[in-house]
Image (cartoon, rainbow, N blue to C red):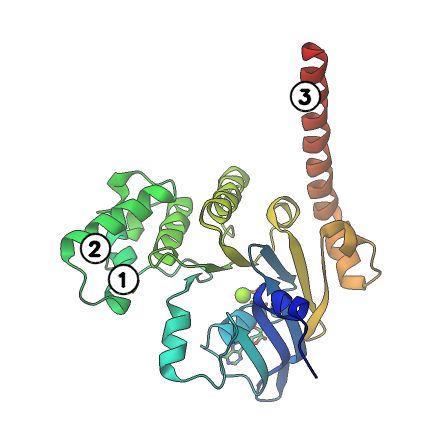
């Protein structure tokens, strides 16, 4: 089969491609023939009940969990058959925020940010390491004074930001976030959501975002993948998902919390439209 230029273009726009993924722990089949495509520049949300295998999916993609079967391509590199050298080159191009932030508690925030830099660029000078760390810390909206602090001295929201600063240490093109707003109050969560969008826009990131947070799903995800029945059962915008009659999707998005998130977005849109109309009226 000859490849058309259009097909090649499309492939280039797929940052993560998973086919036929199967993961099993003993008797427990977590994923079966799962497939997904994450496109360049999108915020790709992954939602699913607790224990459906969202974190295991992320761990498979980043190579911490060897699947029983399947193909996983990241930046076009087949991760399960690539050489260590090829894998290392791909690892330089992504940043990861694990569930719970997982900062090293005995290191300061700045030292945490420096960990990936020291690992991948062992010959950087101390001065340059400090400068890069300070820059990343400010970039995620922390004050420079956060640098010498230990994780235990920070609030939950600040810890998440510190985790993002560390994930951005290597100037990644792809960011993995596992439940980044869990444990934050709604205001802190909304601020964090805004940070993710801002970073995506400014740095041209592609974001793989696992979340339970309906507000996050509604407000910042370009597409949402639903993990259920051991696979991705649907992918789309929220209105597209709402049109499906999958029982879990209906229960999740149409339940009381789903309704509240939907109404909040509708209200915000109506307010924005009214403001625009008023502005137009004043001008005209
Ligand atoms: N290393 C492991 N060994 C055995 N079982 C595991 C392992 N890692 C995950 N599991 C099992 O795989 C299933 C999926 O786990 P996973 O952590 O991916 O869920 P999740 O969708 O991320 O859930 P949550 O929303 O609670 O974070 C669970 O039943 C879990 O117990
Ligand atoms: Mg998880």
Q: Tag 3's secondary structure?
A: helix
Q: Earlier in the sequence, mark 2 or mark 3?
A: 2
The residue labelled by disc 3 is 275
- Report whether the residue tagged 3 is closer than 8 Å to ligand 1: no
Q: Position of residue 205 (x, y in %)?
A: 49, 54
Q: Position of residue 111 (x, y in %)?
A: 23, 56
- In the picture, the quarter occupied by the N terminus is bottom right
Q: Residues within 10 Å of mark 1 (few under 14, many from 20)?
A: many
Classify residue 102 by image quadrant: bottom left
Q: Residue at x 64, y 51 (%)?
A: 222
Q: Position of residue 243 (x, y in %)?
A: 83, 54
Q: Report the Cα–Cα distance between label 1 and label 2.
A: 7 Å
Q: Residue at x 30, y 52 (%)?
A: 151
Q: Report the Cα–Cα distance between label 2 and label 3.
A: 46 Å
The residue labelled by disc 1 is 117
**Where on the image, by quarter, is ligand 2?**
bottom right
Q: Earlier in the sequence, mark 1 or mark 3?
A: 1
Q: Which mark is residue 129?
A: 2
The answer to the question of whether label 2 and label 3 lie on touching residues, with beta carbons closer than 8 A, is no
Q: Residue at x 64, y 83 (%)?
A: 29
Q: Report the Cα–Cα distance between label 1 and label 3.
A: 46 Å
Please say if 115 is above or below 34.
above
Q: Position of residue 16 (x, y in %)?
A: 56, 69
Q: Residue at x 60, y 51 (%)?
A: 213
Residue 179 visible in the shown view: no
Q: Earlier in the sequence, mark 1 or mark 2?
A: 1
């Amino acid at each position: 089969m000859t490849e058309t230029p259009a097909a090649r273009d499309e492939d280039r726009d797929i940052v993560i491609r998973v086919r036929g993924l199967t993961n099993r722990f003993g008797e427990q089949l977590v994923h079966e023939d799962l497939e997904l495509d994450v496109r360049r520049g999108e915020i790709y949300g992954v939602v699913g009940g607790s224990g459906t295998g969202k974190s295991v999916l992320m761990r498979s993609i980043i190579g911490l969990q060897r699947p029983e079967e399947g193909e996983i391509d990241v930046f076009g590199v087949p991760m399960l058959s690539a050489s260590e050298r090829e894998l290392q080159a791909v690892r330089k191009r992504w940043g990861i925020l694990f569930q719970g932030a997982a900062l090293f508690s005995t290191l300061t925030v700045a030292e945490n940010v420096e960990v990936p830099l020291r690992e991948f660029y062992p010959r950087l000078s101390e001065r340059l390491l400090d400068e890069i760390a300070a820059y990343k810390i400010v970039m995620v909206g922390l004050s420079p004074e956060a640098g010498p602090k230990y994780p235990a001295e920070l609030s939950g929201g600040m810890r998440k930001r510190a985790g993002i600063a560390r994930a951005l240490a290597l100037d990644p093109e792809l960011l993995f976030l596992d439940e980044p707003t869990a444990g934050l109050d709604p205001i802190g969560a909304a601020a964090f959501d805004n940070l993710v969008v801002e970073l995506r826009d400014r740095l041209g990131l592609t974001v793989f975002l696992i979340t339970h947070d309906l507000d996050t799903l509604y407000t910042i995800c370009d597409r949402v993948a639903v993990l259920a029945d051991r696979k991705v059962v649907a992918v789309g915008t929220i209105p597209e998902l709402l049109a499906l009659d999958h029982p879990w999707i209906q229960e999740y998005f149409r339940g009381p919390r789903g309704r509240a998130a939907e109404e909040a977005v509708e209200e915000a849109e109506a307010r924005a439209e009214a403001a625009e109309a008023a502005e137009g009226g004043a001008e005209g």
